[in-house]
Image (cartoon, rainbow, N blue to C red):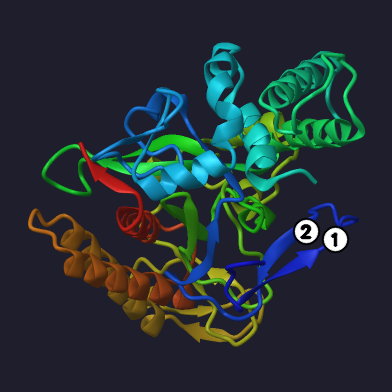
Amino acid sequence: MVGASAKIKLAGSKEDPRGRYVIAAADLGPGEVILTEQAYAACLHPKYFGTHCTACFSRLIAPVACPDCCGVAFCSVACRDKACATYHRFECQYLDLMIGSGMSILCHVALRMITQAGTPQKHRDPEDHFKRTLMTAFLLRCLQKAEFFGRRTTEAPEPTELELQVGAVLLSALQSLQFNAHEVYETRITGEHRFDTAKVQYIGVGIYRGASMFNHECYPGVTRSFLGTSMILHTSRPIPAGAVVPENYGPHFLRQPKPVRQRNLRSRYWFKCDCRACSEDWPKMDKLPDKPRLRCTTADCGNALSYPSKPSQRNVKCNRCKKQINLEASVKMLEASDQLCTTGAEMMASHQLEDERVDEAIELLKKGIALFAQVAVPPHKPTLVAEESLRSCFADKGNANRY
């Protein structure tokens, strides 16, 4: 995968029920960059045509206009010239028509995959397939009128062989983009404090070939941030070599109960999730335990033991390996983990927060999360809060603007 770390690799196959997916090729710690990928194609949401560059999604300061239309703007001459030399020269005069047609942004991305990158089913009911086929014909006609295929010598509706090939690519994209497109977002800071007043705002959609290979889990192992239209994936928790590196497609166990997550995933992505958070039916954030289960200290045992509420309960017999276990050191390491995570979160709460302090907070959170993974198993509220805090720190380093 282009832009991927050597510490991840592809596994699985088309015959595998899980398809192709990403696993760790080596042990991964929290906060590691595992993928930096420029979008194969990306479209800004029409709502932000007047505030963001339609090419790189940067916030506009001194807008540069298109020489032929007033529908979009660019942040620089370089962005304008690049867009007008490729996709925008075909979309320019028909942009109002396309938006006025009511087509979704995914339809625009499908078109952009053709105009930006150049030329080259199952489970759908007849009505849905018909609508996508009709949109394909509409977009193909826009390309014809914009002379994407060159000047036509006839107005006959029959497409040429090349136009049929492009139409097939458009239809294929319209059928698959609901599964593979990623929302591009920015962090909006509306007050003095850069984290307390920060909100994530979706501003567009992008196609990322490498990132689309990550499978879903309701407890993700990575966090997404964006720099322009480039996606950056950081690990949010330790992942051992050989384990799946999971992304999250939206339904997260911290925010949605299992029935809602399962319904949403079946409806949009056509699969039933059997991740650990689903199979064990983990509770939402407000009902998470403050004390986690602790790992058995016997090598390769893998058992999780109840947290000892009293010091006298720290000598226990593991019901899997049948050995007598002392959990004293594990309890102390967990307390140290909680302290690191709390200190990192408190540092983020400071009103006079400089970039250097954000970096310090990231390091403390990474150490706390890694220490937790050595002695305990999720779910654990303080550690999950730390993982969410780490996500906020990485997002702050990406597309972040004050409003």
Comparing 255 with 381, the one in front is 255
Comparing 105 with 243, the one in front is 105
The image shows residue 37, relative to residue 133, as above or below, that is: below
The image shows residue 394, relative to residue 195, as above or below, that is: below
User: Tag 1's secondary structure?
Assistant: loop
- Is 135 positioned to the left or the right of 153 in the image? left
Question: What quarter of the picture does the C terminus occupy?
Answer: top left
Residue depicted at 38% across the width and 29% down the height = 48
Residue that label 1 marks: 13
Q: Amino acid at mark 1?
A: Ser
On residue 97, the disc is none
Q: Amino acid at mark 2?
A: Arg
- Is 360 positioned to the left or the right of 261 in the image? left
Residue depicted at 51% across the width and 39% down the height = 84
The image shows residue 71, relative to residue 327, as above or below, that is: above
Residue 244 in picture, x, y percent from top left: 66, 65
Q: Label 2 near label 1: C-beta < 8 Å?
A: yes
Task: State which quadrant residue 398 falls in.
Answer: bottom left
Residue 183 in sight: no
Furthest-front residue in view?
Answer: 153
Residue that label 2 marks: 20
User: Tag 2's secondary structure?
Assistant: strand
